Amino acid sequence: MNVLRFFISCFIFTTFVFAQQVSTPSLSTLSVENMRKIQSAALESDYALVQTRYLTNNIGPRLSGSPQYNRAAEYVAEEMRKLGLTVTMQKVKVPHWVRGIETGEIVEFSGMAPGTTQKVVLTALGGSVATPDSGLTGEVIVAENFAELERLGKQAVAGKIVLFNYKFDRELAAAGFGGDAYRQAVAYRSSGASAAARLGAVAVLVRSAGGSQNRLTHTGALRYAPDVQKIPAAAVSSEDADLISHLAGEGKVRIKLTLTPKTLPDADAYNVIADLKGSEKPEEVVIVSGHLDSWDLGTGALDDAVGVAAAMQVPYLLKKLGITPKRTIRVIAYANEENGLAGGNGYAEAEKNNIVRHFAAIESDLGASNTLGFLFSGKEQAIPLFQPISEVLSGQGAGIVRWQAGGVGADIGPLTSLGVPSFAPLFDTRTYFNYHHTTADTFDKVEPRNLAKLGSLMAVLAYGLAEMKVEIPR
Amino acid sequence: MNVLRFFISCFIFTTFVFAQQVSTPSLSTLSVENMRKIQSAALESDYALVQTRYLTNNIGPRLSGSPQYNRAAEYVAEEMRKLGLTVTMQKVKVPHWVRGIETGEIVEFSGMAPGTTQKVVLTALGGSVATPDSGLTGEVIVAENFAELERLGKQAVAGKIVLFNYKFDRELAAAGFGGDAYRQAVAYRSSGASAAARLGAVAVLVRSAGGSQNRLTHTGALRYAPDVQKIPAAAVSSEDADLISHLAGEGKVRIKLTLTPKTLPDADAYNVIADLKGSEKPEEVVIVSGHLDSWDLGTGALDDAVGVAAAMQVPYLLKKLGITPKRTIRVIAYANEENGLAGGNGYAEAEKNNIVRHFAAIESDLGASNTLGFLFSGKEQAIPLFQPISEVLSGQGAGIVRWQAGGVGADIGPLTSLGVPSFAPLFDTRTYFNYHHTTADTFDKVEPRNLAKLGSLMAVLAYGLAEMKVEIPR
């Protein structure tokens, strides 16, 4: 996920514990029985694992605009048709940014053996403009954060390559606040280029926004401010940020940076929309979703093949068990979450006159660590209605219901803004940001048991919502 | 370290526990008091840390034959001269292998989107011959181990690229048997190329011999059998080995491999030998050593700047405390441990007529994790003599003395074979092989407290041996 959009205005207010039964159960005894059946089947199913493996190992990275993205969209559509669902391919225009050569070397530093340089492990940030093909060489100036950059001022920064050395807080992540640690660090990836360019910098390096200590780089979208010169931008590994910072403390450090990404004309991509028709209120939909696009360094297993696969598993399980929900369950594999949100925005725009028919929306986009419950964004007084669902989920250790302001997922964010009650799995985030947006986001990082639990949570929650006897207050 | 040579014939026989005092202490009360002073000073010193940082951050990777290696040798010599030691630069001829381009991509596989490939993260093994500059494309055949390769036979293997997918045993490493896990896996790195070539393979890929799950590759020397065609050889990350293996189970997999390393004529390098003259028996020497060369992907912090730095710290501490040992303490920074052992062999060859003057040799070459005690290779009946030393070391949690057959270090191995009592720190090996020989072997991996403990162990042991009142039986 591009967690920035998700977390930027988002504060966790409360953990809601159901101390006692509410007076009027929102779900029938039969619905609850079915939820338990779905849960048992989900915990034993490897459908989501098989789909994740295909999307990652056989198709690979799926950056918007790439042939892999469109192949993946076709694949998901085929799989949903196989289950008998009605599939719509919703066209959206997406950015088409292509990574090129990316190399860095320190060409001047204290202690340098004659005739040598030191390599810098780096990767272009998504959307970055290129350096000249022959590279760009400049002196480095290091700022720990935005405030320090401002203190340095134009005179010190102009003509330099700025390194933002803001350190991802591993302790915060280890304590379970991975999202918060990420939100703090990712501001430099997102806005560092323009902040540096405003003071005349010629390029920007950003310490990778993640917890890895394995010389990995963390790509992700940057945002150029419209009124500032666009300068080349790359993420460096934490080790290289430490190295450059140390050497810059001892004397002049000059770096040669070569980045040759290209921004091509916007491309056609598709949201895959697959409906399992409801038996009683087919015109009302409960969305289960993830995003099908990924960054290009790894194969986007945790971000977010698992989310799409867990969503795909919902109709699979219902079909297998012969259970038809009252409302329509709509699987959506969104295009272009990572670098544009064209998928989420496009869907919401197309459905804006039909928004009251959207009973609820669920999105999974924080990997496949252990699930602890679910997040809800909507009217807080609705929470008691979800008690029968969370009671079932507590049987798999996922009984927490947590209300969250500002939305719970990037793609469904536009729907949340339009009043659609929104849900997402609540994950253990302690390790997610070690792999997120790096080359190491690959299939082996998916722990099958945790993915099965995620699949169960998505299915129980989706079915439960599709069966609810009352409306969720908006 | 190139642990292969170290572990190949090596079995740990016993952990020796001192149940009671021996009758004649091998060290005087004054010597023991001095050991405790040295220990206190070492645990508070950052000398080794500062040296490690300079060798890794300011000089960088130090592969034999590189300008960085020779710069590092000069640097160590200068630092030792600063302490007033007598320095000898012992010239040795070393291999001069230079890494080139290294790329891999899967160009045919099941599920492939038209017009795409999948990248393979790989690195040339040290000493590998090159592919053509334009690359080499071939079908992959996967073998889990040597036995499976043999079963496949010439007919299946000829003309193919062999992937050895032998999995480093992470559980074994996590249980404290990191060296054993490594020894099992590294056989494929070392001998895989010739085993495959013997059956007609055109190139070999070897799953990285290490515990990392971060798409890192593990380089290291290979050995071509003299009677077999030399074929290009690369290590792939565990993730890519899994990927290729999975895809090969579904259909034909073809890989394009480009490796352009060069083997240049042997180069001049230097063992740095620095003597702190003994007060009573200056002609007898106790060696404290590590190897100064490193692989070229990372900066060789754990392998083995820390070993050299901890050895350098021994005379530093003695000078600082004004303590002069009875025997000469000789610091050696060996050239070319990683890909040739020219340093260790050259030293032993030069000293072969003087071997009886070598009272003992210590080498540290397994990183800087927590030290638990020391290893000893020599006559087992000597062990009680070390009791006063291990008693002091037990004060820092490093009281184990473990006898080990077959030597305890690669560079001092030739001395061990000539009868010199040999010693090495006993490390916690649980994490070492996550970084060893990878691009992530950088300064930040050095935990200052553990390095201080290593420095203390090296100094206490070296001084204790230099003070011993009796000979160690040979």
Image (tube, coloured by chain):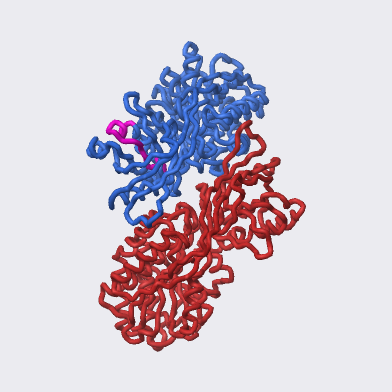
Chain colours: A blue, B red
Asked which quadrant contains residue B328, the reply is bottom left
Name the side, left or right, on which B171 lies relative to A322.
left
- The answer to whether residue B278 is above or below residue A218 is below
A369 and B418: which is toward the camera: B418
Considering depth in this image, is B48 or B87 the residue closer to the camera?
A: B87
In the rendered image, residue A120, in percent from the top left (x then y), is placed at: 41, 47
Q: Is residue A109 above or below residue B76?
A: above
User: Residue B353: x percent and y percent?
Assistant: 48, 84
Farthest residue toward the right? B155
* Residue lying at 55% horizontally and 32% vertically, measured from the top left: A62
* Residue B460 x, y percent position in the rendering: 36, 74
Residue drawn at point x = 30 percent, y = 78 percent: B34
Residue B415 seen? no
Placement of B52 over or under B88, stated as above or below: above
Q: Position of residue B189 (x, y in %)?
A: 59, 58
The C terminus of chain A, quarter of image: top left
Q: Determine whether, in the image, residue A24 is placed left or right of residue B103.
A: left
Q: Quadrant of residue A168?
A: top left
Q: State which region is magenta.
A: A194-210
Residue located 65% across and 44% down the image: B137
Q: In the displayed structure, does residue B399 sit left or right of residue A91? A: left
Q: Is residue B292 visible?
A: yes
Q: Is residue A203 magenta?
A: yes
Inspect the magenta stretch and tell me whether residue B317 lies in it.
Answer: no
Q: Nearer the viewer, residue B60 or A338?
A: B60
